Image (cartoon, rainbow, N blue to C red):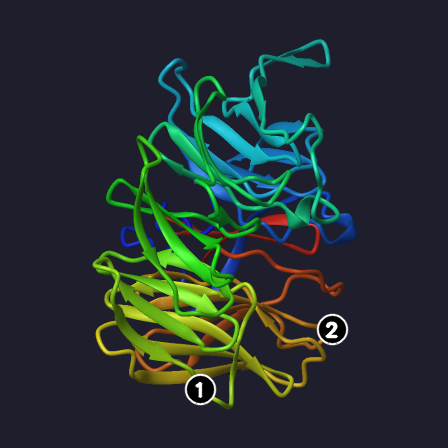
Amino acid sequence: MEQGDPGGTGYAPDASPPTDGIRVRWKQPLDTTDGYGAFPPIVANGLVYSVGRELLCVTAADGTVVFRANHSTGPLALATARAYNTLTLVYPTWDGAIGLNAGGGISGGGIRTGLSRWKTSRRRGGVSIPTGIGSRELPAPVAANDTVFLADPGTGTGLMAIDASTGQIRWYRPDGQRYPALGGRPAVRDETVYAVGLAESGYDYIFGYDTETGKQTFSFSPKDVLFSVTAAPDYLVVGTDGSGLWAVNYDETRRWTYDPQELLLTHPASVAVADGVVYAGFVWGGRNWLVALDGEKGTEQWRSELSRGVIEPRVGLPAVANGVIYVPTGGDQNETQGLVAVDATDGHIRWRFSPGDRFLSISPAALVGETLYTVGNGHLYALEEQ
């Protein structure tokens, strides 16, 4: 799933991906036409799953294709399924979500069977109401044990908890006047799922719900439009429209605010948290920036210019491991775009990866073992130390 862990921190403490240079260990073609393919791969049990206008599953070791499926999907999540021997692969639809056999089912005679497990939907008045165009606009699911949490793709006014074995909706919110917003990736920490929502007052809030029962247990508002929430071990990191980044304690009090006047927080906010440091993407003046903040006080430790001369600057979701932050950047044909490896100590650039001559969006990185997996230029890549 996006950002690797249920809290959305992007931190992979057990991984040791390439730090000083890279080479391509293998690559597999992936149909990413029309801009599809900016979703990060996910890795489990020696398999890598990636999505564009198709669903691709390959072996992590050498990229051998396990299966391809005609599923033009949104961002993926893998969840434990107590009724099965394999995980359930979940992706959102405009009706709700679809669960697939992560093992791919059985193939014979050119026909694949046993791939689909369930389809669930939450409809208002029997009609699904799309709020965007294409699966690139669909919200990211988050898996925690055998439950998948997803902002309602059809209406944009709810948060659902889905049983990964059956597809049954265990609980659904809103509760009265509170509406978790479409597109906000939920974040899970210590049996609570957090989501961006709109309250009756007209202000955006972060609401917390018990993962088992759906009972509301937390609420906080910076009185601003909110972009995202990340659940770090000791605090939440909240991206806002007009007041930068907020850190919020789990007792519903403000920890700190970081709002530089000369930089603009990306939308949605691109945030990672590792070893007590918050990393966030900012843009301004045709440049992409990564800023490191002390997680205790919110003071700036360093800022790194990732690229310049960009028509429409943007910074993707960072991933962190082994003292390096891996950041996708984009905006135009500028040669400094692609995946950038940034040293966590002082922010200097260690290396860049810009695959091919034809620039398309490059995905956030998936970090497992000694390998970095990413999607770009119509391929799924496995990168290792040079």
Q: Check disc 1: other Cα within 10 Å, few if <14, some if 14-19, many if 20+.
A: few
Task: Confirm or deny contact between disc 2 and disc 1 (CB under 8 A).
Answer: no
- Residue 223, image x and y in percent? 43, 69
Q: Which residue is depicted at the point 69% across and 25% down?
A: 126
Q: Name the residue type under label 1.
A: Pro
Q: Which residue is depicted at the point 47% across and 20% down?
A: 168
Q: Which residue is mark 1?
A: 260
Q: Quadrant of residue 322?
A: bottom left
Q: Check disc 2: other Cα within 10 Å, few if <14, some if 14-19, many if 20+.
A: some
Q: Which residue is depicted at the point 46% across and 42% down?
A: 176
Q: Which residue is mark 2?
A: 333
Residue 331 lies, with reference to residue 120, above or below; the image says below
Q: Name the residue type under label 2.
A: Gln
- Residue 101, image x and y in percent? 52, 21
- Residue 296, visible in the rendered structure: yes
Query: Which sits in the foreground, 221 or 100?
Result: 221
